[in-house]
Image (cartoon, rainbow, N blue to C red):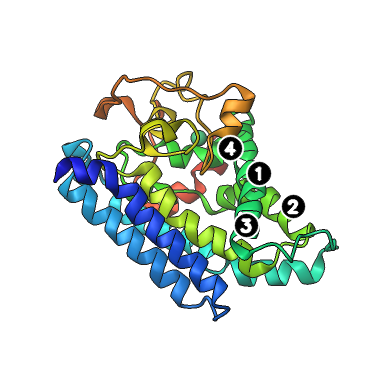
Amino acid sequence: MKNWVRLGAYPIVFGFTAFAQLLLLQANVSLWPYAMAIASTGLVMVALLERAFPYELSWNRDHADTLPDIFHAIFSLGFIFTSIEIVQVASAYLPVATVWPLAWPLWVQVIAAGLIIDFGLWFMHWLSHRNNFLWNLHALHHSAQRLYWLNGERRHPLSAILLAGPGTFLAIVLGAPAEVVGCWYSIIAVHLAFQHANLDYTVGPLKNILGVAEVHRWHHKKEYEDAQVNFGEFWMIWDQIFGTFHHTTMRVEPGDVGMRENMPTTYWKQIIWPFQRTS
Ligand SMILES: [Zn+2]
């Protein structure tokens, strides 16, 4: 059973939810509230699987982080599940080109929009590790002392906007339909949970091109110098192209993840922390 879960968790749970989101888009029905229901089902599946098949047993225990992480998740998932509306409003105020290949099959359009958004995320994530102001905002994500499904949404709201903004902006001005962008974000919500999941799973050689936990755990290493690799959100191809891909068979242990600095454990203190930090 454990081996089946190890090999099947990502392709079955992520694959099923992604396929369901694409079917929903293809059926041309209102994505609300079905897209959220499908993604939520995937998130619950990841949360349940990591209880039963943890990568690290101690990471299933609260580290004084569950409550603030729930609040962070409400905001982060709020952005994701209203991304269609956000794109619709933005499209009304932005110069939108007519170059988007609207005649392509919808699933191909979702992948195309996803590539643009994902590259924007990779670049802004890479930049967030180099620019002091951006790092102060991004540090909250790295301050987690364990890795589990909710970490995918543990982001400062301003950091989330700055990470996703440029790629999404580019997709909008190229003319990507709001539903296509929204579909990608609904798909990604489940992937982000897998990326941080405390679940003993593998995707085999696909870890070279997919930003799954096997490669992403290393990005959460406590030693800042170690963490300057594997910035990819969904695709690892950007890390492969720009030389920041790193894979090792070394196991990431409980004491290995987090940040040298202490992060407050209450939600509001975490929100104002970047603006109080001076170095
Ligand atoms: Zn990072």
Looking at the image, which is closer to me, 224 or 103? 103
In the rendered image, residue 47, in percent from the top left (x then y), is placed at 27, 54
Q: Are marks 1 and 3 in contact (CB under 8 Å)?
A: no
Q: Is residue 98 above or below residue 168?
A: below
Q: Which mark is residue 125?
A: 4
Looking at the image, which is closer to me, 86 or 119? 119
Residue behind mark 3: 108
Q: Nearer the viewer, mark 4 or mark 3?
A: 3
Q: Separation of disc 4 and disc 1 at Cα? A: 8 Å
**Residue 22 visible in image:** yes
Location of residue 133 (image quadrant):
top right
Residues packed near mark 1 inside 10 Å, few (<14), some (14 to 19) or many (20 plus): many
Identity of the amino acid at label 2?
Answer: Leu
Residue behind mark 2: 170
Q: Is residue 54 above or below residue 84?
A: above
Residue behind mark 1: 120
Identity of the amino acid at label 1?
Answer: Gly
Q: Separation of disc 1 and disc 2 at Cα? A: 8 Å
